[in-house]
Image (cartoon, rainbow, N blue to C red):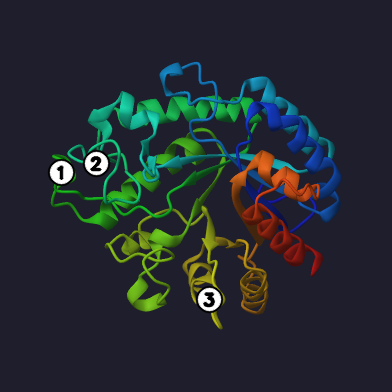
Amino acid sequence: MAAPRNGKWQAVHIMAPSPEDVPLLSTAIEKTLAPLGINALILEVNYSYEYRSHPELRMNGALSKGDIRDILTTCRKHRIRLIPQFNCLGHQSWDKTTFPLLVKYPEFDETPQIPLDNPNIYCRSWCPLHPKVNEVVFALMDELIEAFEADAFHVGMDEVFLIASDQCPRCRGKNPADLFAKAVNDYHQYLVKKRKMTMLMWGDRLLDDSVMKYGKWEASENGTAPAVDMIPKDIIICDWHYELREEYPSVPFFQRKGFRVLPSSWRNVQAALALRDYARKNATDKMIGHLCTTWASGGDIARALLDDPKASDSAKQAVQALKAVVQGG
């Protein structure tokens, strides 16, 4: 399925809920997301699933296959495409916590000399050249694909700052763009070529900040940008930008390169509408819709969608922006 059956993507990205919040999220899908016209839901799972192939990689509060099926049942009832996300390469830690893959398999770490409480770094990465890392990661992907009965998969890939590290004996001295492209191509080969999936990824590492002037978060300053010309063009690029700007030059850029594009906004209403409107004005047939990110747990977003005052301010703001984007046509 190249796109939701009823036309342009009206998509939302949500972090996995806790198991106890699954019924609440299903209710929010039923009562709010479906009536808003949302037709794709990207659920970022990462290590919050009860993996059977590698149970050592489960985090506390992991979702069961039954939990996923409950969400899937609700989505299918309302013709919402449910897509799993597993962050690949980067985002293997957060604050003082390193995620299970690099704790259980330290040999996969791109920066093994950095302590596991992550002083002075943003997020860890795994080594894209380690000969065993994909074997583990693909097993996790397989389980999510089965549980979600998925035909699409989001591989993350945003904000990869630790790449081609001198601490890694395999990557030391290598070209960052080559390494990043190698990782993307590995996932594409497995998901698209072998599993016949649609593959999505964030676009920031494919943008040269010296050209785009977005800053080091929304574009690359560490040499990965040339990878844009080294990867397949059938990948859907989720082009995220969260600040108000007059122009978003990456939107036409990715289309010229031949990618399908999902401009992706967050909680700033003015910025979300500006991105949406700029994308529409610069749309070709490669512009397939819009993605509203939320960056909150499924339970928190569900509370905001259901007007529960217990929702966090960030979740409320994300939902306000979501409604503004989709209700504006």
Q: CA distance from mark 1 to mark 3?
A: 36 Å
Q: Taking the image as drawn, is residue 39 in sight?
A: no
Identify the residue at image location x=47%, y=23%. 58
Q: CA distance from mark 2 to mark 3?
A: 32 Å
Q: Taking the image as drawn, is residue 141 in sight?
A: yes
Task: Left or right? Give the position of 89 relative to 260.
Answer: left
Q: Which residue is mark 2?
A: 110
- Report helix, strand or loop for mark 1: loop
Which comes sooner in the sequence, label 1 or label 2? 2
Which comes sooner in the sequence, label 1 or label 3? 1
Q: Which residue is mark 3?
A: 248
Q: Residues within 10 Å of mark 2 (few under 14, many from 20)?
A: many
Identify the residue at image location x=56%, y=25%. 62
Which comes sooner in the sequence, label 2 or label 3? 2
Question: Between 167 and 187, which is closer to the camera in this rendering?
Answer: 167
Q: x, y (%) of residue 50? A: 54, 21
Q: Are marks 2 and 3 in contact (CB under 8 Å)?
A: no
Q: Which residue is mark 1?
A: 167
